Amino acid sequence: MRKFAKISAVLAAMVLALAFAGCKSDDDDDDDAKPIQAIVINGDVVTLYDDGTVIIKASDGTTSNGTYTKADGKIVIKDSKGNTTEAKSTSDGKVDTSEPITIKDKDGNETKTEVKEKDTETNKGNGTSSTKNILAGKTYYSIDFEEKEYTSATVNRAKICISMLAFDSNGQKVKYTELAYDFKNGAVNKDNIIEPDVLDYSVSGSTLTIKAPEGVGEDLIATIKSDGSIDGMKELKGNLYAIAEANVDNKRIQARAHIVIVNGSSCTYEEHTYQSNLNQEDPWTLNGTVSGSAFTFRYEGKTVSGSLSDKEIVIYTPEGVLTLKRM
């Protein structure tokens, strides 16, 4: 397995740009929203936090957020769609699971149903809150231009990292996969190397911690937003294929990251381009269709086609052939 210090370096851009927003000192730990109760309503897991917010993980795996209020011996939960759930409150301010609850939709229709308690204590053996299950079974990705430099055709740099975090369905491990590409002074130093690592992780409130192997590097910290997603990353549904490239001349360096996401009969092409003479990153996406082992994208009246397998995708473009490896 690779040194975690190397992982830390590769992830530095992601951590600094999106993750450390959720990193807190000992002095402000008390400001973190803490889970106080998790209940199950019609198969949905509803977690109440001490700041008056809730996170709802539906039985189909989708996640949303909401709020709750306490008054007159009742707790009223309101979701993002305008539906409300009214429950009796216990003496310590939690939902009384011994009594049925009333669910009222946005049109005013009411139904009563049972509610069950779900344990929010720490899981045995790993000391992490069960709210980490918000991420269980989900996958996220990001594209980062970690270094960009152009002085001349002989002094230049383009370092690209495409990262993927795949959380197992048991809420115990996360598989971190990176595609690393390094172009320096007109030559390729690292040519689309794909390397995976399986790591422990934990969640406390809105803070995600990915554990470093013992004695190697530091833990990585990221922020989980109220809808259950990771700040600064995109959720991935399907298989991710990727490649990066760069070229340089006496005017500029141009670097590109290409990814294709295949999800059933649909696919999405996403390209991020950095060009030094414009000093900007220019991302854009294109939707396409999949039929068997072939796929097609259409753009401005033109058709771009290709073939795919479990390991790679080959795109045939007017400029040539582009081969993306599965991450």
Image (spheres, rainbow, N blue to C red):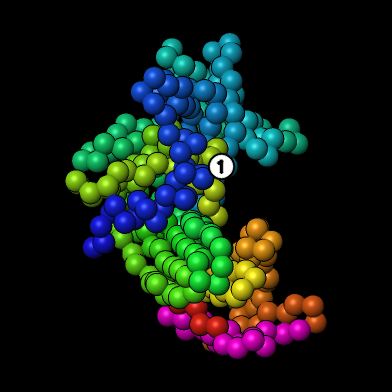
Q: Is residue 117 magenta?
A: no
Magenta stretch? 302-321
Q: Is residue 316 magenta?
A: yes
Looking at the rendering, in which quadrant would you find the N terminus?
bottom left
Q: Position of residue 95 (x, y in %)?
A: 47, 24
Q: Magenta segment, principal secondary structure?
A: strand
Answer left or right for 182 relative to 72.
Answer: left
The residue beneath circle 1 is: 227
| Residue in front for this viewpoint, 282 or 82 | 282
Residue located 56% across and 63% down the image: 150
Check the image and report above or below for 156 versus 310: above
Check the image and report above or below for 74 versus 258: above
Q: Position of residue 14 (x, y in %)?
A: 47, 50
Check the image and report above or below for 278 versus 224: below
Q: Position of residue 111 (x, y in %)?
A: 62, 35
Residue type at tag 1: Asp
Residue located 33% across and 64% down the image: 196
Residue located 23% across and 49% down the image: 216
Callout 1 secondary element:
loop
Asked if one can make out residue 273 in the rendered structure from this viewpoint, the answer is: no
Q: Position of residue 179 (x, y in %)?
A: 42, 67
Looking at the rendering, in which quadrant would you find the C terminus?
bottom left
Answer left or right for 34 relative to 282.
Answer: left
> Is disc 1 surrounded by few (<14), some (14 to 19) or many (20+) residues within 10 Å?
some
| Residue in front for this viewpoint, 183 or 67 | 183
| Residue in front for this viewpoint, 76 or 308 | 308
| Residue in front for this viewpoint, 266 or 232 | 232
Asked if one can make out residue 48 in the rendered structure from this viewpoint, the answer is: yes
